[in-house]
Amino acid sequence: MTGMGTAADFAGFAESQALNGGSPTYQDWARGVAADPELCALLDTLPAPRRQPNLLFAAARLAGAPTGSWAEVRPWLLAAWPEVELVMRTHTTQTNEPRRCATLLPILAAIDGPVALIEVGASAGLCLYPDRYSYLYTSPDGGRTRLDPPDGPSEVVLPCAIEGPVPTRVPDVVWRAGIDLSPLDVRAPADLAWLEALVWPEHTDRIGTLRAAAHLVAQDPPQLVTGDLLDGLPDLVAAAPADATVVVQNSAALYYLTAAGKAAFADTMAGLRRTRGAVWLSNEGWTVLPDVAARLPEGLAPQFILARDGDPVALTDPHGRSVRLL
């Protein structure tokens, strides 16, 4: 992917993810990059996986980019390119959005427990604590339902619009672990700064939630294993308590695999279901798992698809703001 491919990727990001995700800033920046041969040429010196719009924009902001218009950002970016490039070569897109727990909860809470929860592509592990957060669900009629952990309200409250039955309990998570190529530690200021840089500029409410969740998780950090999800997952499942239901979840993680890698992961999960009774919850973009998308009813607008063992069960907002149960 070089030249026109990079420009097309940024143009597509502007009119899809940035537009639907509510970031006029990133839409403006992405359009600017797409129309800028000089910036595209700089990006083409990076390996293909390092040319992602989210990675460029987060790296620029971590390095101190202004959050104004593309006309303001472009000269800064050209001048600061060596620093931005270094961040892009040494970091990966690891958005860790705890609000996704609110969209996973209606399905996760219905699974027989106790639960051993494993996340692939776990980043800092903020989505491994669905039992420690409070939830505030709003139904289409305006009704509001609050759900707290058994030991009382949490310092982290996750608001979410919901269409369908509201969950009545949080899961009984007795063991939790994650795997990531480069796990982050919320106790490390540099890692927390990177997590914050990955939050889109207009989403200031997400920053508050991220900081609150990071504070909670820092008090009881999860087990995070460094490794490739295709190789390390079976060992992690084997380490889970034998008397717990293993739930493997992924959210906006499989996008970064090749088609062959996605197929291999699906095969791995099928094997773990047979041998360990593991449940697979995937929460991915519309195009990431074509076999899952093919099972959806016709006429639905593209969103993230939440699936249980490959069967679609809900449509979700990428940042956890809404869930529509199918």
Image: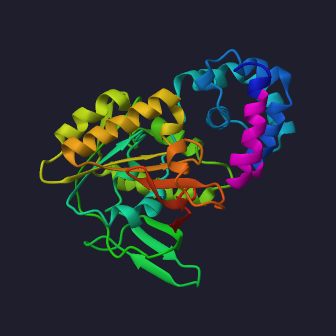
Residue 155 appears in the figure: no
Q: How is the image coloured?
A: rainbow
The residue sitting at the left extreme is 243
Q: How many marks?
A: 0
The range drawn in magenta is 7-24
On the image, the x and y values in percent for residue 61 come to 66, 38
Q: Which residue is drawn at 52% across and 72% down?
A: 162
Predominant secondary structure in magenta? helix
On the image, the x and y values in percent for residue 158 come to 47, 66
233, 133: nearer the viewer: 233
- Position of residue 208 in the picture relative to residue 298 (left or right): left
Relative vertical location of residue 5 with respect to residue 125 in this rendering, above or below? above
On the image, the x and y values in percent for residue 91 come to 53, 28
Q: Quadrant of the N terminus?
A: top right
- Position of residue 176 in the picture relative to residue 101 (left or right): left
Q: Which residue is drawn at 55% across and 45% down?
A: 196
Q: Which residue is drawn at 54% across and 60% down?
A: 315
On the image, the x and y values in percent for residue 247 come to 29, 51
